[in-house]
Amino acid sequence: MTKQPVSFVTNKSTRSQDLQGVIDASMCIGCGACVFADPSLKLELDPVKLIYQPSHASNADAASVCPAVQVDFAGLQDQIFPGAEQTEYGVVHSVLLAQSTNYDRNLKASSGGLVKELLLQYLSQDDVDGVLALGHVGGIDFETQLVTEPEQVDRLPGSIYHNLAQPRALELLHELEGRYVLVAIPCQLEGIYQYIYQQAPHLADKIHTTIGLLCGWQYSHHALRAIAEFKGVNYDEITDLSFRGEGPVGRLRMWTGEEMHAVGRRVDFDYQVAFDRSFNTPRCHTCINHSNYLADIVVGDAWLPATVASRTGVSLLICRTEGTHNAVRALQEAERVKVTDVTTADIMESQKRRVVFGDFAYAYSAYLDEIGVHHPDMVGPNRPAARLSPRKDVVKFHKELNRKLELQWARRYKFLRLRKATVELPKHVKKYLDWFFVRVLRIKSLTGQRKEVPRTALRDFR
């Protein structure tokens, strides 16, 4: 019998008492913090929802560290960046565009290749004992691994988009002695830091630097099952996969043994169906921290008009500390990366304001509050800048999301493809028209809405 989708009725007065609301509302993101707060817990893949969830409701200790219950951004930022000025973009020391001068590394990354350049830089320092970054385990399984040798860095995968169980990062911090660079997505870092500062403060000294990813959403395993079905790939035989590579947008590649199946991410209609926002893990719809406020340096794609012509991709960097800014400059002086300075306005333009400032997420959380649905309690530094999406848009989204989840959980993916080709086709076409006018024609610059990064500033970039 198929479970019903997100009806999510939760008694909000018990929000912090246990994880029942998180389980009922499918809000777990798999960070694993709760597992260390309560060792009786395990993260298990729900066979219908196809996301990881805690094995049972547990207790207040587990709820207190769970980023699907609440995130104390103000308190965490005071711990991580004591005395630093808080802006609507979080703590910001500098904003840069950068690109690795290593062509293969840059091309494989699809953005600028800066994460791996930074990892190599930190591994060369005497005060760094290793890197904790995502590595391939087998099939579609990935987990945090210890990297100590430079030759291991280029074997690390790029960004992984599907939901994972991530307790290994905290497990390694408990096991290891020394200081480490940690690579993490925003919600994972929220859980790690909440656990550390509440229950294991000695672990904070083991973190040398955090490299955060600008998050482009996390997907349930239904997304992979759907694209595999559309492309005639046996999902159960997938031995490896890569979501990016071979250019700025990149291709999704799935291996079944020696055979590789590639899917274009921008123009392939099946990809647009399978990686529609309805396939996101539900907490993503309420996330206001795509810019990774708790990371020392944040790395993501620079989706700007000035970078459209890039053959290999360009990274947007948000350096939140002087130390991370200096690390990038050291790479520049060694001619391992090309760098140009930009401003916080380019963060918003690159990632879209509704994402950077949480326009939709804050409005959606308010609606979930209104109808008695569990959601994480999160107020970030971007809240004063947010322009909440209209309530009617949020209500419509919630209704459509529930219908799409019904189809996903029943694995009726072809109905979602039919819907995208009919009812949703105008919106789908509009997305590409917006991209063409804003990114290619630079319409905002022509109409005086903003000052674009001049392409001459990137003349040395590929």
Image (cartoon, rainbow, N blue to C red):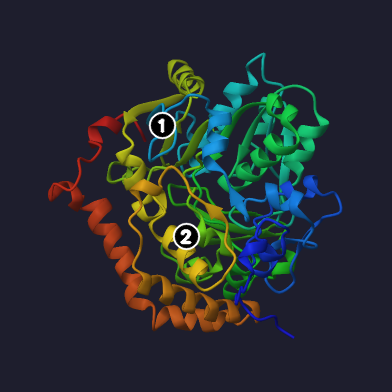
Q: Is residue 122 above or below residue 444?
A: above
User: Gap in Å between the C-alphas at discs 1 and 2?
Assistant: 23 Å
Q: What x and y, as percent, mark residue 359?
A: 38, 57
Which quadrant of the view contains residue 139?
bottom right
Which quadrant of the view contains residue 362?
bottom left
Q: Amino acid at mark 2?
A: Arg
Q: What x and y, as percent, mark residue 171?
A: 79, 39
Name the side, left or right, on which 443 lies relative to 195.
left
The mark nearer the N terminus, 1 or 2, is 1
Name the side, left or right, on which 78 lies relative to 88.
right
Residue in the picture at 23% in, 57% down = 437
Q: Crowding at label 1, few (<14), some or many (≥20) Cα neighbours within 10 Å? A: many
Q: Which residue is mark 1?
A: 98
For this orientation, the residue located farthest to the top is: 126
Q: Which residue is mark 2?
A: 265
Residue 328 seen from this side: yes
Residue in the picture at 47% in, 29% down = 320
Q: Quadrant of the N terminus?
A: bottom right
Is 414 or 348 nearer to us in this picture? 348
Is 117 or 145 nearer to us in this picture? 145
